[in-house]
Amino acid sequence: MRPSLVLVLAVALSAGGALASTPFQPKTRAPATPAVPQVASKPNGDSVVATKRDSDEDAGRRLWNRSCWQCHGELGKGDGPAAAALVGGVPSMEGKVKTADFDALVGVIQAGRGRMPAYAEDIDKHDSRRILVYLEARMAGRVGATPAVKDDADDKKAAEEN
């Protein structure tokens, strides 16, 4: 039994020695080229630099379409498809979404009020504010209509086609 153990150790050491004698050669990468920002134009003609992160309006639109429009409706009028099933309906948000009131409205999204459930576990305060940025822009006509059922997969497909 001893000779086979010695043989195993000898083979292991020789293989390890061979590996140790091979110099480590890290993979080389091509030098990084600096990203060139893409410049786009808003409908009003202002130039904006594209970033990897969605604008607050775009992120807010996706969140609105995922969590809010079903009760509040596409324009926040309280006429979403689920509103009819709720006792007392859903109040309209027209004229209530103003930048000065965002802190209070973020609190409503987070903690809920009346028949509206709390969304703190699903939507953080920053995303709550993005929803309000989108809704304010939508109500003011700065953001065009988007189908309420449009989701992230539709956005990715559209981006791939362009």
Image: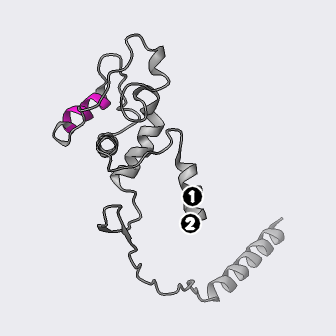
Q: Tell me the colour scheme of the image.
A: one colour
Q: Which numbered disc covers residue 142?
A: none
Location of the C terminus by quadrant is bottom right
Q: Is residue 83 left or right of residue 139?
A: right
Location of the N terminus by quadrant is bottom right
Classify mark 2: helix, strand or loop.
loop
Q: Residue at x 35, y 61 (%)?
A: 43
Q: Report if residue 71 lies within the magenta region.
A: no
Q: Residue at x 77, y 77 (%)?
A: 11
Q: Amino acid at mark 1?
A: Ala
The percent coordinates of residue 23 (x first, y second) are: 60, 89
The percent coordinates of residue 46 (x first, y second) are: 29, 67
The percent coordinates of residue 121 (x first, y second) are: 39, 32
Q: Is residue 14 left or right of residue 111?
A: right
Q: Which residues are magenta?
A: 102-110
Residue 24 falls in which quadrant of the image? bottom right
Q: Report if residue 107 lies within the magenta region.
A: yes
Q: Is residue 111 left or right of residue 68?
A: left
Q: Which numbered disc covers residue 162?
A: 2
The percent coordinates of residue 61 (x first, y second) are: 41, 45
Image height check: is 69 above or below 14? Answer: above
Q: Amino acid at mark 2?
A: Asn
Q: Are marks 1 and 2 in contact (CB under 8 Å)?
A: yes
Q: Which numbered disc covers residue 158?
A: 1
Image height check: is 134 above or below 73? Answer: below
Residue 26 falls in which quadrant of the image? bottom right
Q: Would you call the spot at circle 2 few (<14 residues within 10 Å), some (14-19), or many (20 or more)?
A: few
Q: Residue at x 38, y 37 (%)?
A: 123
- Magenta segment, principal secondary structure? helix
Residue 8 falls in which quadrant of the image? bottom right
- Residue closest to the eye, 77 or 72: 77
